[in-house]
Every structure is written in C-alpha cells, then in structure tokens.
Image: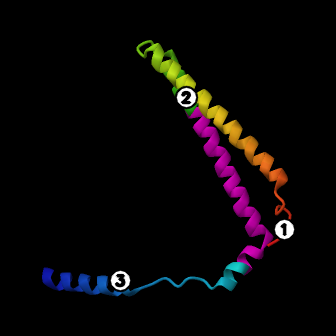
Amino acid sequence: MCRAELKQFHKLKAITDEVTLAEPEDRLWQDYWCGVYNRIERGIGWIVFSVAAILLAVYGGFKLVEAIIEDPTIGMLLKAGLLALIAGLAILFVSALRERLYFWGKDRYRNVRR
C-alpha cells in the first residue's frame, strides 16, 4: 500500500519537475504597458506603498527614540550617540536629496524620449 503510493508520488514529482511556465511574448508585455491605465495604476501603487512605508518607519523610529530617551536605565552616552546618529542620517539624507535635485535640473537627457 505505502510502496504503491510512494511510487505514485515519485511519478507525480517527475511530472511536475518537467512542467515549465511559458513567459509571455515581448509584444504582449509592450501592449500591456502601452495602456495608460496600467502605467498609472502601477505608479500610484508604488507611490502609496512607499509613502506608507516611510510614514510607518518614521513613526516607529520616533517611538523607539522616545522610549530610549525616556528610559532612565539607559546611560547618557548611549542617548547622545543615538541622537548623533539620527542627526548624521538626517544631514546625509538632506545632502543626497540636494545632490539629486541639483543634477536632475542639469540633466541634459531628461527630455529625451526612449
């Protein structure tokens, strides 16, 4: 009984190992992405997801920092180091953002269509 079922499972595994999914043709992908609705939908989805992830990360970060700062058992050196780390990250973020905006304004290929 078990031997017969094991044999059937081995057959099934052999069959499923041979199955491959067919990738859609390039033309189908191009037709799909030519639709304005499809592009807008994907773009809006990523924007909403990104904004929500950033808001949750910032909120969680503030709550974590608040808990660490208010905890009397944590030393001042650790608290100062955490605040310095946050200040450094903020400065780096602003610096990178300014750099991207500067080069985006000077990008000579910005208006070139593909």
Q: Secondary structure beneath disc 2?
A: helix
Residue 60 image offset from top left, x and y in percent? 55, 33
The quadrant holding residue 17 is: bottom left
**Which quadrant of the view contains residue 28?**
bottom right
User: Does the stretch in magenta take in 22?
Assistant: no
Q: Residues within 10 Å of mark 3 (few under 14, many from 20)?
A: few
Q: Which residues are magenta?
A: 31-60
Is 63 situated left or right of 15 in this image?
right
Q: Residues within 10 Å of mark 2 (few under 14, many from 20)?
A: few
Residue shown at the point (52%, 28%) measured from the top left = 64
Which disc is residue 112 wearing? 1
Discs 3/2, front: 2
Q: How is the image coloured?
A: rainbow
Which residue position holds label 3? Answer: 17
In the displayed structure, would residue 1 be above or below residue 93?
Answer: below
Q: Is residue 55 or residue 88 the one in the foreground? A: 88
Q: Is residue 46 above or below residue 67?
A: below
Q: Is residue 26 above or below residue 66?
A: below
* Secondary structure state at the residue bearing disc 3: helix
Q: Closer to the N terminus: mark 3 or mark 2?
A: 3
Of the residues tagged 1 and 3, which is closer to the observer?
A: 1
Residue 85, label in figure: 2
Query: At label 3, which amino acid type do we have?
Result: Asp
As drawn, which residue projects farthest toward the right? 111
Q: Amino acid at mark 2?
A: Leu
Task: Identify the mark at residue 75; answer none if there is no mark.
Answer: none
Q: Is 58 in the magenta?
A: yes
